[in-house]
Image (spheres, grey):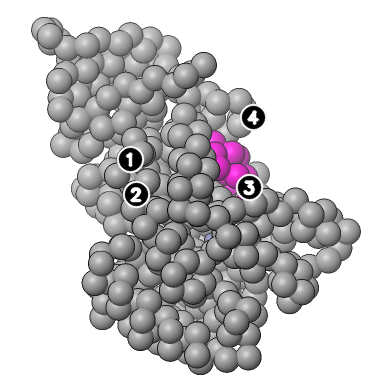
Amino acid sequence: MKLILRNAAAIATCSASGKRCKRGDEMNDVGVINDADLLIEDGVIKSIGKAGDASGAETIDVSGKTIVPGFVDAHTHAIFAGTREREFAMRARGVSYSEIAAKGGGILSTVSKTRELSKGALRSQAAKRIDKMLEHGTTTLEIKSGYGLDFKNEIKLLETANELREESLSGIVVTLLGAHAIPPEFINDRDGYLELLIRELIPYVGRKKLAKFCDVFCDEGFFTPGETRRILMAARESGMLPKMHADELSASGGVELAIELGAVSVDHLEHIGPDEIRRLAGSDTIGVILPAVAAYLRGTPAPAREMIDGGCPLALATDLNPGTSMVDNMQTAMFFAISLNRLTVEEALNAATINAAAALGISDSLGSIEIGKQADLLIVDGDYSIMPYHFTENKILNVVKNGTLLEFPG
Ligand SMILES: [Zn+2]
């Protein structure tokens, strides 16, 4: 099956020129090719430039439009039950996230609602979210567990994510986040919960191949660096790759640990300091910023300007979750990264595509427009900068997933 997109005003390739991701000044260049065609065959990009005669190909005229790679949302908690607008209102009156969490709100309130819901109900709610994300340009996303926090419910969430991966048009990468918080039953027995994670849940998930990554919320009030190390070492032994939530609420010591453990990414980083930025720049671990969270928490944005200027590879994600980021749209995440974290539009676009793919270990086949890569593409109504500029509207006219032009109802 052949598809030609003809006469694009521009193609922003986001190519890293054969490298896994972009860093420093490279992030400010999205590799624009002007006035070009794009030929796709059997889901793969075959040529970029003037395509000439291509008989038998479906042809779409994209004059005046820009083609960009499909967004990769490298950090979401997209399977959850219930919403938490009351906590949003409490925070607006000055109650802190940690105070709400200490009173049984926060993550644990979503845990109790998620435990009550059946797999079928969770799956159909999440499927709607994922379809909406796809319509707004997210062609691949990561989904974490972490609202089950016991053996049965963590497995329920991971199985749901894997079923969605089979059924959905979107690409889905699954992450075990059993160490999202200490569940209420273990509040006076932290070691008991760690034992459950390390001796039962992680080996089972590894054996059944239910997750590619294992993540830990390494922060004040959640898991210490020592506990995080034990969990991620066990995960590595069970065949999962390490990821971490770090430095969201305080300087947790998580970045150093993430680098030492060879984590694929370390996410949040609102409180990362200059020494850690230097260490991260010298490592292969990708820093993932989640700017909507600072907006929701009225918190400090991650010092992403300093991170890019210091040479760190940086990716961008929504952190879609009911507590601190009801944002499911990468165009919105780009806007927040530009306005709060002082990224340029080009840095935000690279962070949302090639570097986000690298943060999921899939940038060899996704995240940029290059010959031989999977054809996950967005046709933008104008220049690519219109996406964050007018983020309250969907500026993506068409989504091409795996070489197929998608139709959305309505
Ligand atoms: Zn998160």
Disc 2 CB within 8 Å of nearest ligand 1 atom: no
**Number of the front mark, 3 or 1:** 1
**Number of the front mark, 4 or 1:** 1
* 2 and 1 marks in contact (CB < 8 Å): yes
Question: What type of secondary structure mainly makes up the magenta span?
Answer: helix
* Residue assigned mark 2: 163
User: Which of pointers 3 and 2 lies earlier in the amino acid sequence?
Assistant: 2
As measured in the structure, the alpha-carbon distance from the residue carrying label 4 to the one carrying label 2 is 31 Å
As measured in the structure, the alpha-carbon distance from the residue carrying label 4 to the one carrying label 1 is 29 Å
As measured in the structure, the alpha-carbon distance from the residue carrying label 3 to the one carrying label 4 is 14 Å
**Number of the front mark, 3 or 4:** 3
Establish if 268 lies above or below 8: below
Query: Circle 3: is it few (<14), some (14-19), or many (20+) Cα within 10 Å?
Result: some
Looking at numbered disc 3 in the image, what kind of residue is underneath it? Met
Residue farthest toward the right in the current orientation of the protein = 93
The answer to whether residue 110 is visible is yes
| Residue at 59% in and 65% down | 111
* 3 and 4 marks in contact (CB < 8 Å): no
| Residue at 72% in and 67% down | 105
